Image (tube, rainbow, N blue to C red):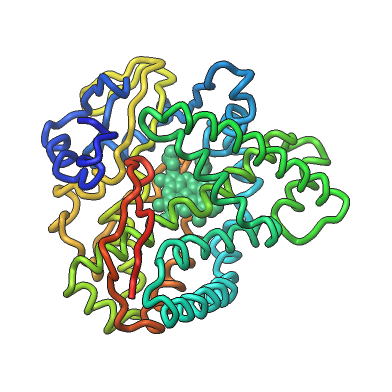
């Protein structure tokens, strides 16, 4: 199985099905790790304490310095007790009630973007569902939540894209150089923002954390910067692709499209979960054994890696009826698109608000929306999504 092969990336699901049918986790020589493809195994990997998110620093350290600590000091790549400390510091800002209160703001942003899309539609005859809607919406929301200035919002996506390309299989030398540069610039930018907020605090999350850092007990400067960069990146990367993948799958299933067009509000809650199950925006998350650990009869020795394949787990036919069918009204949908265990997505409530606000608004504004031409996929598996989706 070659994860960088364009024909695999175009539709990985038949091969992932074979992998599930092969049974227990299997060793992948090229990746140097076990792969847990079945739902129960992927779920176990994410929930087992002795399988941790342990970041392996890249070498030479002189070139990867910021990239390394942006990961090793962030919430996502830490394990308890550091993970517990960092998650409790940012957790409150992402609680269900605080996030629910953002809905009117999310709707305002969505409506503004739809106004601009409508203008494009009248002048060009189409617009790009990714660049004009799915991407700017979560970028603007997470930037506002953290207090990242509007004038610099355009910097976020390129920095983030350069960094996340390193999560793919065999990144090129050019991609590596871009990631080093982006990590350096992003870290320096957030460092100066933090200094500014210490002097002129606002009501945003960076100001809140800068005060905690100043007190000096619960958070140091590197942890603060790493966690803010993580939030800014994680706060939009998967959301863009989750929305785009789901919409393309719907366009490709005319009876589901009809259902959505006729009942956008009634069906939104189940539709967004099905978007994330049917064509997952995030496919592979690694863990490293901190002690010998057995997963379905396979021994993962201390120091060895095992990956949970989320997109595969979400198509497991032993858990989901008609697993390969898109069913926007699906009632039983225990997908693990947001992960599981202690690293369960902190932004899940935010991303659910973003999608449940933006999906009906899009279809109400453009009830006959459809593909203008074949959408163009990104050539990546781990973060799976589209480059452009022109619609009319
Ligand atoms: C459709 C959208 C999203 C999907 C599918 C998604 C998925 C995930 C997954 C699978 C993980 C767990 C990774 C692991 O176990 O190794 C995760 C963690 C995380 N996500 Fe999301 N995410 C989404 C949106 C967001 C948003 C909007 C934010 C906003 C800040 C966010 C912030 C985070 C953070 C901070 C973590 C790390 C949590 C921890 O380590 O305790 N995510 N996400």
Q: Nearer the viewer, residue 150 or 22?
A: 150
Residue 98 lies, in percent from the top left, at 60, 65
Q: Nearer the viewer, residue 373 or 184?
A: 373
Residue 90 lies, in percent from the top left, at 63, 49
Q: Determine the residue located farthest toward the front in the rendered image.
A: 123
Report whether 96 appears left or right of 210: left
At horizontal 32% and vertical 58% (from top left) the residue drawn is 245
The answer to which image quadrant residue 187 occupies is: top right
Report whether 174 appears left or right of 75: left
Location of the N terminus (image quadrant):
top left
Q: Determine the residue located farthest toward the right in the rendered image.
A: 199
115 vs 85: above or below: below
Camera sees residue 357: yes
Camera sees residue 346: no
At horizontal 46% and vertical 26% (from top left) the residue drawn is 173
362 vs 299: above or below: below
The answer to which image quadrant residue 99 occupies is: bottom right
Residue 289 lies, in percent from the top left, at 40, 21
Report whether 279 appears left or right of 131: left
Q: Nearer the viewer, residue 310 or 343?
A: 310
The answer to which image quadrant residue 242 occupies is: bottom left
Report whether 97 appears left or right of 291: right
Q: How many discs appear?
A: 0
At horizontal 56% and vertical 73% (from top left) the residue drawn is 109
Residue 340 lies, in percent from the top left, at 39, 44
At horizontal 36% and vertical 18% (from top left) the residue drawn is 304
Location of the C terminus (image quadrant):
bottom left
Q: Nearer the viewer, residue 140 or 354?
A: 140
């Amino acid at each position: 199985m070659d994860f960088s092969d364009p024909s695999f990336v175009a539709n990985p699901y038949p091969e992932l099905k074979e992998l599930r049918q092969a049974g227990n986790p299997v060793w992948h020589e090229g990746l140097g790790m076990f792969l847990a493809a079945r739902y129960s195994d992927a779920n176990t990997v994410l929930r087992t304490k002795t399988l941790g998110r342990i970041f392996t620093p890249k070498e030479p350290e002189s070139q990867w310095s910021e990239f390394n600590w942006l990961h090793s000091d962030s919430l996502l790549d830490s394990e308890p007790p550091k993970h517990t400390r960092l998650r409790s510091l940012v957790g409150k800002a992402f609680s269900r009630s605080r996030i629910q209160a953002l809905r009117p703001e999310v709707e305002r942003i969505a409506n503004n973007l739809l106004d601009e899309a409508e203008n494009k539609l009248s002048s060009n005859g189409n617009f790009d569902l990714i660049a004009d809607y799915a991407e700017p919406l979560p970028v603007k929301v997470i930037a506002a939540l953290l207090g990242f200035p509007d004038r610099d919002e355009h910097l976020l996506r390129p920095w983030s894209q350069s960094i996340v390309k390193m999560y793919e299989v065999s990144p090129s030398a050019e991609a590596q150089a871009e990631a080093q540069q982006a990590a350096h610039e992003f870290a320096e930018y957030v460092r100066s923002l933090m200094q500014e907020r210490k002097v002129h605090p606002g009501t945003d999350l960076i100001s809140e954390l800068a005060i905690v850092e100043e007190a000096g007990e619960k958070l140091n400067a590197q942890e603060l910067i790493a966690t803010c960069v993580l939030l800014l990146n994680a706060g939009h990367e998967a959301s863009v692709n989750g929305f785009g993948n789901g919409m393309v799958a719907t366009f490709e299933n005319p009876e589901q499209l009809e259902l959505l067009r006729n009942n956008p509000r009634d069906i939104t809650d189940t539709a967004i979960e099905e978007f994330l199950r049917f064509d997952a925006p995030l496919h592979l998350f690694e863990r490293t054994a901190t002690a010998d650990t057995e997963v379905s009869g396979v021994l993962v020795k201390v120091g060895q890696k095992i990956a949970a394949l989320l997109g595969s787990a979400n198509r497991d036919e032993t858990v989901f009826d008609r697993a390969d069918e898109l069913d926007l009204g699906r009632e039983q949908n225990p997908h693990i698109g947001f992960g599981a265990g202690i690293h369960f997505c902190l932004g899940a409530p935010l991303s659910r608000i973003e999608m449940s606000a933006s999906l009906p608004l899009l279809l109400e504004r453009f009830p006959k929306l459809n593909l203008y031409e074949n959408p163009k996929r990104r050539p990546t598996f781990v973060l799976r999504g589209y480059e452009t989706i022109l619609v009319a």
